[in-house]
Image (spheres, helix red, strand yellow):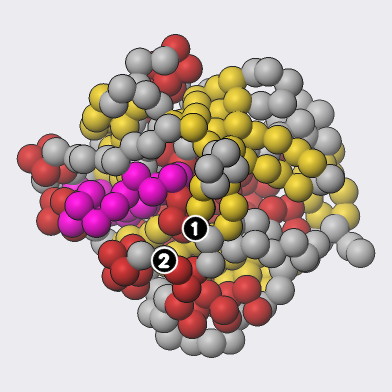
Amino acid sequence: MPNSRPDHARSDASVDLLVVGALTIDRFPDGTTAPGGTVLHAARAAARARASVAVVTAAGPEPEAQEGLRELRRIAVLQLEAVPETLVFHHDERSGRRRLSLDGSVRLRPDPRLLRRLRPLAMLLGPVAGELDATALATIDEGIEARVRVAALQGWLRARAADGLVTPLDPADLPQAARAELRNCDVVVASHEDLGHAERHPVASAATALSDVLPGPGLLITWGAAGYVRAEAGTREPIVVRRRSAIAGLAATTGAGDAFTAIMAIRLARGASLSAAARAADAAVDRWLARQPGATRRGTGD
């Protein structure tokens, strides 16, 4: 895990990336648990890239949550809202498909006075389960100005059944407050799983359908090891980017999508185009995965 500060300090007290969202506890089929959530995975990616990062999050007193908070304090400027219980995700794999179940509920309530001290070049909104409601978003909008705004759509596209099972929510059913916030972003990122796509390789129609709901921002639809779909702001001609090779042999790739989004946001804030930022993010995540135990490279052809 990263444990060092960035190798540069800013005279204007700004940070490269601010990530906002709830911390989670992830429980896996083998009985292990670990802290998680976009805030943690994105902060780790920023630290690996030696970028400065701040985090606004909510977490409870559980040992796993406290472990995640200790790590965040080492690598980021942390604004914490203490809550009675941390969100818990139960991960399962059935027939090659990931299944998620969720316990708990959190509504993030950032302190506007503390928010005004943060001066991020890029901001990543990374909800995991609806914690960024209209009240939270209004507070963030009032307190934060950023050169680039990026949103990870996953938390807004998750519906929870009575038994806790998480299912994809149709983008057309997004709450109006979320739609308004997302339309004001520079880029919105979603995974094909969050959008309910089961195709093996990226399809352009995924971005076309999402742009009908969210006209305005650029779009990136990640497709795991297979690649991604990119749609520039203001266009309806998505570009499918397919990987020629990918990393295999890993027990889990949890957090890879969040790492991709974090690096992409940082590069955008430094002036890169969406295509260049996505390529840099894809390459950074590929290098990180290649260093994991058991990693091997394979082709991605049919």
Residue visible at 38% across and 59% down in the picture: 150
Q: Residues within 10 Å of mark 1 (few under 14, many from 20)?
A: many
Q: Are marks 1 and 2 in contact (CB under 8 Å)?
A: yes
Q: Position of residue 164 (x, y in %)?
A: 55, 39
Left or right: where 74 falls relative to 13: right
Report the residue that reaches farthest toward the top.
63
Q: Which residues are magenta?
A: 119-138
The residue to which callout 2 is attached is 174
Q: The C terminus lies in which quarter of the figure?
A: bottom right
Amino acid at the residue labelled 1: Leu
Q: Specify the quadrant of the image occupied by residue 113.
A: top left
For the point 42% across and 76% down, the residue is 214
Measure the C-alpha gap from mark 1 to mark 2: 7 Å
Picture residue at 72% right of the left edge, 68% below the top:
202
169 over 274 or under it: above or below: above
Q: Looking at the image, which residue sits at the far right?
A: 302
- Asked whether, in this view, residue 168 is left or right of residue 128, the answer is right
Residue ID for mark 1: 157
Chain-order first, disc 1 or disc 2: 1
The reply to whether residue 263 is in sight is no
